[in-house]
């Protein structure tokens, strides 16, 4: 197959298609993603000679030897400590008090607490598990069908990678050489937009089906209950406050903000007597398991991405795409489609490390802002978390409830459509991603 670009003709043979076929087969056989990527990378290096195979070990360690990646385990650990200290329940109490005036109030509170948890942990799976255990049974008691309750939590937890601080933005910043703090700032409006879209979807579905009543409350009673909730749980918001203020004021790097959040959360746990020294082994092991899934994928994906770059695959992709059409709006739609499809079958981390260097030249070619491209990519991949066959959040909520994945996925269709609408807005309107950025980034 020949991909013609303006500068060169790139011919791809079995040194490219062989490793890709191997990767697809290994994924289909349920081989761990990091092992499938590693085997494909080694085969590509052997057949193509793009990089000496003897440099593989050095490349693996060099790929994860970045200070910015230290923030990943710190935010994961912060989320775990948050759950074990019971502070996450304070978020739910405040969210429920805020939404008690409306019909479908607890459903809306569930989405809000997903967003609050996302503003600390940066992980969607952790948010789905933590919030799901707290809310799904209560949602069912409030009148929601169990599959829909699971879908609501799964959709709300997608904000884990969309609302800063997000692990996904740390990784894409590392891959493309963009400051994570800049991406966090750019992600504020898009992250809130997705959260609002999920809230609106739930309100519409609740009104159409009459699942949850409520809302019959006077103003005095509303503010009284809200005051009680804030009085008993205001201190829980110290942690996200430190993270946001530290990062957005420029006083702390994401890594420093993560470390500070861990320390503050642990101290609060001891003060509240909800955390004991005996909790630390299980807490650290739990966080290490999550981190142990992410880092090997990054380590093996980077040599693969380097090999693809040396073979000219990104340039070839740009040439093939622009040969089909020169219309920027069609090319953007094509990128969104590729990202959503990739998000449906593979985790965010390998998608970022492999696809970002391939799609970024196409975005540059049509004049898309690089910050806008990053936000669009993460948001589109986020849709895949609630889309079969491998929507991660679907598996998480199914695992904690025993509900059928297909039933949950069917109930998640309205959320997918609304999230897709927001993704397209982000893709076509640069202001949504660059509103808070200095002029140098616009």
Image: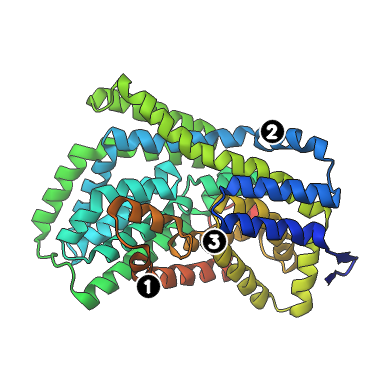
Rendered image quadrant of residue 2:
bottom right
**In the rendering, which numbered label is found on residue 345?**
3
Which residue has dot 2 on it?
Answer: 61
Whole-percent x, y for residue 358 in the image:
72, 59
Foreground pick, 142 / 429: 142
**Residue at x-position 45% and y-position 45%:** 122
Q: Sequence order check: which comes first, mark 3 or mark 1?
A: 3
230 sits left or right of 251 in the view: left
Q: Is the residue 15 above or below the residue 1 in the image?
A: above
Which residue has dot 1 on it?
Answer: 414
**Residue at x-position 25% and y-position 39%:** 234
Q: Sequence order check: which comes first, mark 2 or mark 1?
A: 2
Res. 390 visible in picture: yes
Spot the residue most to the right: 8
Rendered image quadrant of residue 89:
top left
Do tag 2 and tag 1 residues touch (Cβ < 8 Å)?
A: no
Q: Nearer the viewer, mark 2 or mark 1?
A: 2
Q: Is the residue 210 above or below the residue 271 in the image?
A: below
Q: Sequence order check: which comes first, mark 3 or mark 2?
A: 2
Q: Is the residue 269 above or below the residue 19 in the image?
A: above
Callout 2: SS: helix
226 sits left or right of 405 in the view: left
């Amino acid at each position: 197959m020949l991909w013609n670009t303006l500068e060169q003709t790139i011919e791809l043979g079995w040194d490219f298609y062989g490793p890709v076929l191997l990767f697809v087969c290994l994924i289909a056989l349920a081989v761990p993603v990091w092992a499938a990527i590693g085997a494909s990378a080694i085969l590509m290096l052997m057949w193509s000679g793009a990089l000496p195979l003897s440099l593989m070990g050095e490349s693996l360690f060099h790929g994860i030897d970045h200070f910015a990646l230290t923030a990943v385990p710190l935010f994961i650990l912060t989320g775990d400590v948050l759950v074990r200290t019971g502070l996450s329940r304070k978020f739910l109490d405040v969210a429920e008090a805020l939404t008690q005036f409306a019909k479908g109030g607890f459903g809306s509170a569930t989405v809000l607490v997903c967003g609050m948890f996302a503003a600390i942990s940066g992980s969607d799976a952790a948010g789905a598990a933590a919030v799901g255990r707290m809310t799904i049974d209560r949602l069912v008691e409030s009148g929601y069908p169990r599959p829909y309750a699971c879908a609501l939590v799964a959709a709300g937890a997608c904000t884990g990678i969309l609302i800063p601080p997000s692990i996904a933005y740390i990784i894409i910043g590392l891959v493309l050489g963009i400051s994570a703090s800049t991406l966090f700032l750019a992600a504020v409006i898009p992250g809130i937009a997705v959260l609002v879209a999920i809230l609106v979807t739930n309100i519409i579905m609740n009104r159409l089906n009459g699942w949850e009543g409520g809302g019959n409350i006077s103003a005095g009673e509303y503010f009284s209950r809200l005051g009680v909730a804030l009085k008993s749980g205001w201190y829980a918001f110290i942690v996200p406050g430190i993270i946001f203020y530290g990062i957005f004021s420029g006083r702390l790097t994401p890594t420093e903000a993560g470390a500070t959040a861990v320390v503050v959360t642990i101290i609060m746990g001891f003060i509240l007597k909800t955390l004991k020294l005996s909790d630390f082994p299980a807490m650290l092991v739990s966080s290490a398991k999550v981190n142990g899934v992410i880092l090997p994928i990054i380590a093996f994906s980077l040599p693969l991405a380097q090999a693809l770059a040396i073979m000219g695959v990104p340039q070839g992709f740009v040439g093939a795409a622009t040969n089909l059409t020169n219309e920027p709006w069609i090319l953007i739609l094509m990128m969104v489609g590729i990202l959503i499809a990739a998000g449906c079958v593979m985790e965010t981390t390998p998608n970022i490390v492999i696809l970002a260097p391939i799609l970024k030249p196409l975005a540059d070619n049509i004049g898309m802002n690089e910050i806008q491209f990053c936000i669009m990519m993460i948001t589109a991949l986020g849709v895949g978390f609630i889309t079969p066959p491998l929507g991660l959040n679907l598996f998480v909520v199914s695992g904690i409830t025993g509900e059928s994945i297909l039933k949950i996925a069917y109930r998640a269709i309205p959320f997918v459509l609304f999230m897709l609408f927001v993704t397209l807005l982000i893709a076509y309107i640069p202001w949504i991603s660059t509103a808070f950025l200095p002029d140098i980034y616009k």
